[in-house]
Amino acid sequence: MNDVLNVVVDGLWRQGDKNLAVRLVAANGEPLPGWQPGAHIDVHLPCGLIRQYSLTGESTTESYLICVAQESASRGGSRYIHQTLRPGQTLMISAPRNLFALRDDGPVLLLAAGIGITPLYAMLLQREAQGVPFTLHYFVKRREEAAFARELDHSLTHGVCLIHCSSEGKSPRQTLAATIPAPGAGERIYTCGPAGFMAAVREVAAAKGWAETQIHSEAFAPVAPVVASQQEETFTITLASSGEKWPVPANKSIAQVLQDNGVAVPLSCEMGICGACLTPVLDGVVDHRDTVQSAAEKTAATQHIALCCSRSHSRDLVIDL
Ligand code: FES
């Protein structure tokens, strides 16, 4: 477990009728590590779960702000935060990790759905402070669900924010084609929300002339099952440092095999969405199953593998451990 920080819950308040904003401050009163929009932290909940949440709001080291949706299909993290977490409670968190950073200082088209607003709200505030043009399209089922609606309603000098509600006939399916224009010079799209929403964004944007390299996304849930099925082939994982090798059977992840053999693996989400376990690959063909890396990163000359969920197309895979 790297860089664990002790923090105190300094405030909890509603953001829309199904989200809870949580402000965290360092337990020792010191500034927290700096971060940039797109960063997330692992939150170690006292119920034993570790969950990833994007940092949102202004990029400050005085406190961290996260915002958590009340999920009807909660695996426990959202339920704990909504029903049990209280101001004054101490928590452990990781240092911020950023796999969704703004790539440059150019104009941005931000497309959020549901609680996917959190990293994009931080990006919007940074662009507003920098005086760089932005447009935010924020899709929610009902207007009352929108987080940061009051803040987004304040006059913005350098960009615009539009909230689209499915209950008002403006679902992504009905509206995306009209909201995504042809790309402007130097413009990039950042999108966050359910996998289906982001896939629709990519499809519409591609049809409007956006290149794959101009579109950046972050998923909150795996898009493919991360548990290997019995039809999977067994392959061999080799540690470059020692030459030790072990078979990875169909019913185990690489991370599980490594841990079974006493190799420490930094794990967090175990679903391929946080990047904690990304490890350089020195030889072999990776069967990528994570949603952390972009398509370009998954086909780059230098490859990384998410040990918690990805597998191998080749019989042998050599990793830099
Ligand atoms: S532990 Fe999160 S991507 Fe592997």
Image (spheres, rainbow, N blue to C red):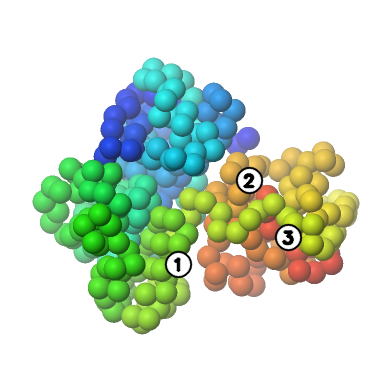
Give residue 245's position: percent from left, percent from top: 88, 54
User: Dot 1, crowdedness within 10 Å: few (<14), some or many (≥20)?
Assistant: some
Q: Secondary structure at mark 1?
A: helix
> Where does label 3 land, which residue?
311
Hey, what amino acid is under mark 3? Arg
Q: Nearer the viewer, mark 1 or mark 3?
A: 1
Q: Secondary structure at mark 3?
A: strand
Q: CA distance from mark 3 to mark 2?
A: 14 Å
Give residue 310's position: percent from left, percent from top: 69, 58
Does residue 169 appear to the left or right of 40 in the view shown? left
Give residue 101's position: percent from left, percent from top: 42, 56
- Residue 134 showing in the rendered view: no
Q: Nearer the viewer, residue 215 or 240?
A: 215
Q: Secondary structure at mark 2?
A: loop
Q: What residue appears at the point 44 percent right and 40 percent down from the top-left corner?
A: 72
Rendering quarter of residue 240 = bottom right
Q: Nearer the viewer, mark 2 or mark 1?
A: 1
> Where does label 2 land, which residue?
270
Q: CA distance from mark 1 to mark 3?
A: 23 Å
Rendering quarter of residue 213 = bottom left
Residue 70, compared with residue 7, is above or below; it is: below
User: Dot 3, crowdedness within 10 Å: few (<14), some or many (≥20)?
Assistant: many
Q: Earlier in the sequence, mark 2 or mark 1?
A: 1
Hey, what amino acid is under mark 2? Glu
Hey, what amino acid is under mark 1? Ala
**Quadrant holding the N terminus:** top right
Q: Nearer the viewer, residue 133 or 170?
A: 170
The disc at residue 199 is: 1
User: Dot 2, crowdedness within 10 Å: few (<14), some or many (≥20)?
Assistant: many
Rendering quarter of residue 50 = top right
Q: Is mark 2 within 8 Å of ligand 1?
A: yes
Q: What residue appears at the point 23 percent right and 61 percent down from the top-left corner?
A: 169
